[in-house]
Image: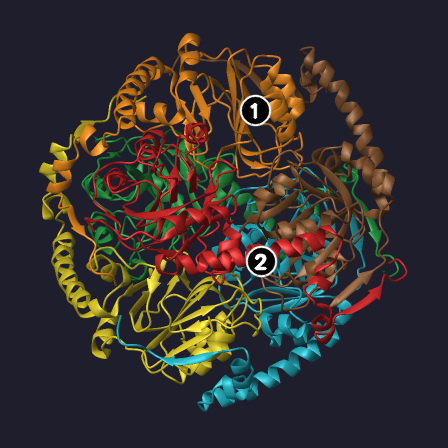
Chain colours: A green, B cyan, C yellow, D brown, E red, F orange
Amino acid sequence: MGIVVRNIRRADRSTVDAFAAFGVATVHEAQGRAGLLDARLRPVYPGAHISGTAVTVSVPPADNWMIHVAVEQCQDGDVLVVAPTSPSAAGYFGELLATAVHVRGVRGLVIDAGCRDVAELARMRFPVWSRFVSATGTVKQTLGSVNVPLVCAGQLVRPGDVVVADDDGVVVVPRRVAAQVLAASRARQEREAVSRARYQAGELSLDVQDMRERLARNGLKYVDQEADD
Amino acid sequence: MGIVVRNIRRADRSTVDAFAAFGVATVHEAQGRAGLLDARLRPVYPGAHISGTAVTVSVPPADNWMIHVAVEQCQDGDVLVVAPTSPSAAGYFGELLATAVHVRGVRGLVIDAGCRDVAELARMRFPVWSRFVSATGTVKQTLGSVNVPLVCAGQLVRPGDVVVADDDGVVVVPRRVAAQVLAASRARQEREAVSRARYQAGELSLDVQDMRERLARNGLKYVDQEADD
Amino acid sequence: MGIVVRNIRRADRSTVDAFAAFGVATVHEAQGRAGLLDARLRPVYPGAHISGTAVTVSVPPADNWMIHVAVEQCQDGDVLVVAPTSPSAAGYFGELLATAVHVRGVRGLVIDAGCRDVAELARMRFPVWSRFVSATGTVKQTLGSVNVPLVCAGQLVRPGDVVVADDDGVVVVPRRVAAQVLAASRARQEREAVSRARYQAGELSLDVQDMRERLARNGLKYVDQEADD
Amino acid sequence: MGIVVRNIRRADRSTVDAFAAFGVATVHEAQGRAGLLDARLRPVYPGAHISGTAVTVSVPPADNWMIHVAVEQCQDGDVLVVAPTSPSAAGYFGELLATAVHVRGVRGLVIDAGCRDVAELARMRFPVWSRFVSATGTVKQTLGSVNVPLVCAGQLVRPGDVVVADDDGVVVVPRRVAAQVLAASRARQEREAVSRARYQAGELSLDVQDMRERLARNGLKYVDQEADD
Amino acid sequence: MGIVVRNIRRADRSTVDAFAAFGVATVHEAQGRAGLLDARLRPVYPGAHISGTAVTVSVPPADNWMIHVAVEQCQDGDVLVVAPTSPSAAGYFGELLATAVHVRGVRGLVIDAGCRDVAELARMRFPVWSRFVSATGTVKQTLGSVNVPLVCAGQLVRPGDVVVADDDGVVVVPRRVAAQVLAASRARQEREAVSRARYQAGELSLDVQDMRERLARNGLKYVDQEADD
Amino acid sequence: MGIVVRNIRRADRSTVDAFAAFGVATVHEAQGRAGLLDARLRPVYPGAHISGTAVTVSVPPADNWMIHVAVEQCQDGDVLVVAPTSPSAAGYFGELLATAVHVRGVRGLVIDAGCRDVAELARMRFPVWSRFVSATGTVKQTLGSVNVPLVCAGQLVRPGDVVVADDDGVVVVPRRVAAQVLAASRARQEREAVSRARYQAGELSLDVQDMRERLARNGLKYVDQEADD
């Protein structure tokens, strides 16, 4: 507690930016179904889709002092990732903090607690994925830490990791495997484009993905509906 | 388990289509306050309003194999109704499956579990009512069944039943009583139009619905506010 | 039970109307972080922002009879505040009741239970903050009370109090302190405008709010990231 | 609504009684993983384990009138199964009703709503599986039905079906397959006794159930822990 | 905030003590189904049953400083009633604080947040009704208030009010009506004793409470089960 | 996925065993309020209190195959720590698996999912802390991993870490700091013994912990209750 880590190593910028072309579901699959934050985090308005590098903030319950401290550590392309040390529904973040990080190029906030001023955040197009929407205020009295590894909504996030978020939720990609997961996401998207075209042409996934034989081997039976009960 | 029922009897198509003119609340009331699925099912985007015939899918937790099997059983005017055999928050259904059923004329999905790619679903205008939005992937390893009667979000749904869904939720109407519930929905809507006109003219439901005497008989008392506490 | 209080004292109209210029978060802070209803109440469509005077309705579970009774007590500038005597997810309020109160100048509904017809409510622009969206119907069989003090979503609300609601939630301001809280809201908004301008110019809240010294005194340490783990 | 079905066909009594020797988990597995009521139903005191025949009661929210009606339909060996038509946390059942059904030989209550007087129920050893414990009272004003098929906690229950309940929860076995599921439960218990003995002797399920080859084929790899991170 | 009210008026001691003979459900009914705290408050061990006078404590989230302040205001026969100003799952109260209030004659704690050391509390037989069990610690940094009216788990509690708690939950009785509610509880218990005796003798509530005619008037129909479906 | 790490480094056995003398709340505080698993994990029976070394198991939803694999990696003094890769309420663990690990000296199970056979587990005195009790079965079809670092109920747990669990919940202590946290726990317990003795003698924490001056400095005011409202 009470530590701010400066000069963190961030995932490569061009890699990070390239992730914005892929949905959270695609990245999550491409990473071997890992890294997905709990589905309790929801966007405060629909339609946002970002990628960025994590600046992590560990905060006490109902105390947002460390978010103010974290602003100074943010740079263009970052995403704030905030987790309380015990569950809190308080509104840690609103339009004023959003203004402060927006001018520094921060792309969004992921917080396993509450945020507020959501109408203004939508107007500013500053996206937030949060557990709660709540106007409840916070205090500025207890230290936490900035840029330490932390667990946010059930996933370990390290400073500098890649965060991708859209209407489906939030996924984290460790910095060291970012390039490799990006390549896998691309490959997956290409495969999906082929399937999509075949589905649009009326083909069935039973055939496109060759499932019929394995289904039969597992014992699937087709019957016609009996005389009406 | 492991049964696919083909050639189900569906509710009459013109009856099914006519239900789209009535809200879920109206149909639920017209049916004697029956058939409403649990309110935990919410639309993934606002504004959709559909009616269709149920193709039911019983799926294992976190396994969407049987939805692929069900696609082949779908035809124009159907609605997929999916229920897991034990609770699951996984994302069983996304844009690719939506594409596959959309070309077959399926009107929407009702699922007591998770779905994903919700931004794409909104763009495609393929409506989904789900319990969760989650990018969590599923496997294709265990059989379930298609077109068997099942309980979805607390209601018994039989294949071929009518499903009506809008921003208020989802209601199921058994195939055999569909025509009769449709007529009752129409009658109710007409009565409501009369009430609406009187309310817009400033009349009170106390008078329109003749409640004053029964209220008095039940002991309702009118008092003026006392000197300020 | 079974009491309707007429001729309630309402907060001063110009004060009430002036609150609509301030967000719920601002009013809640200006009031000393008091009066916020539980965050489980959510708007049924985004973008509404109202202030008004409370007409309170205490209702039995799944019984909306007293809302019909309450309509007659409503006047221009009011907000209905409804709380069930035990938890209920039923849909107490829909488009017909909205029509009836809309013509009387009622500005919205706050209900710690369910509402329905939410697509129509959005079209009418009649805003509702509710705990559930549910088409479940209610009966008209048991008395409750109108314009008695009640607890709604965890806050005591008295008839005539000021209610402010926006996308962040709902806050109640007691009638007797309304003018004073309005002044404090104004003062707070002015202070925030100054901060906002400084943040937009790239200043940090660490400096604008002079936090650095207190942080250091509390033991905050800045370190550089170590050689990679 | 408003129907009481008398003279229901009950599952065979000796079969029903024999189920009490098997845990809910065993019966659920023996039935092909079907019939388990949602885990939100919990016993109000630990240690009860019953089997019996279902007398079903469909009740309005917060109204227990039909439970009073159902008492008369109960006979020795029955279990009351109560489901509200919309969600309710009210306390539908307490020590007085327990007394009334206890003298008729009813073995317990399963209710997807609330019950009360739980200290007295524990003293009487009248077991209840409920969703909530709540002292909230109910009214006696609206009809429901007795001995109609209903959905309770996500499972279809028909009057006369077998209900088995213990500290793990509640499972329903359809009357027509009761004998067959009982036999399967016995067979499963015998197989488990063999496994148990081998486990107690220190054998591993990897060997007892011959899992090693399939694990290897699926790609499981054994590694030793690396030099410490 | 920051107020401690001393020398509160407490409900009459002999009245308060007499309430311990009545269950929460009885008192709640006798009071006209009012005063019941939300069922989310559960006892940390079964079997406790207390009555006492409320000493109220309004606390910030995750900060238990004011409970320490409140100890000094407690006297023999009191019950601590604690509510956070915004939701908190922290463990505000454990065995040390229990020791401190126990020696002053405090009979229990009611808290709409978390408590800890529950094994020790059970050993000491110091009963607690809480929303959460959690070892999460709290800080001592922000003021709250002692002996102000507050909302706890949805009910208004004033200092000196009577609190009754058992395995069913918690009910509050306003000080001014305590004697009257006590008398009503006694009357209700006596009526129930008569019913209980008749039920034990095998009579039905349908007859004891004379329900048959009203049921018939409401349209209840008795039918025999049809030939098997 | 699909990795089993053998020969993990475990925390020192005498240190691990010594932790059993300290409650979870004490250890959590002694560790600087870190390491507490989410309070949703609850013991399946009251009164258990264990310490041990973590054998971690990452499992697919509703699939307990890897727990069978993990048994072989367990040794005397271990505690199984199981987390699903996406949320699951299935019953992963029952009496048979408990038997298998019990004979190897495993002290308990911590699982962020469901377990079953809880009556037998209580009889065997094999303690489990779980998120759900559910008889729902699991399959054995998909690989996971054993003895990899994982997040369980919001906390990072590494194989060989110390796990302490009692009726308050579960706390994890990293292997490398175990000795130091043990010493801090001892010191804390000694300080608490002193406080306890002073409280039992009737002293107030206000004095024992010297709070009065800081309270006054923060603005706490004592007032007497006014003439009755």
Picture coordinates of residue A21, whole percent (x, y):
41, 48
Provide the chain ID for the residue under circle 1.
F
Residue A204 in view (yes/no): no
Residue C89 in view (yes/no): yes
Q: Quadrant of residue F105?
A: top right
Q: Quadrant of residue E78?
A: top left
**Front-most of residues A66 and A129:** A66
Q: Which residue is disc 2 drawn over?
A: D87
Three-letter amino acid code at disc 1? Gly
**Front-most of residues F199 and C9:** F199
Three-letter amino acid code at disc 2? Pro
Picture coordinates of residue D66, whole percent (x, y):
69, 62
The quadrant of the rendering that contains the C terminus of chain B is: bottom left
Seen at 55% across and 87% down, the residue is B210
Callout 1 secondary element = loop
Q: Which mark is residue B70?
A: none
Alpha carbons under labels 2 and 1: distance apart = 43 Å
**Front-most of residues E74 and E154:** E74
Q: Which residue is disc 1 drawn over?
A: F2
Picture coordinates of residue F139, whole percent (x, y):
67, 32
The quadrant of the rendering that contains the N terminus of chain B is: top right
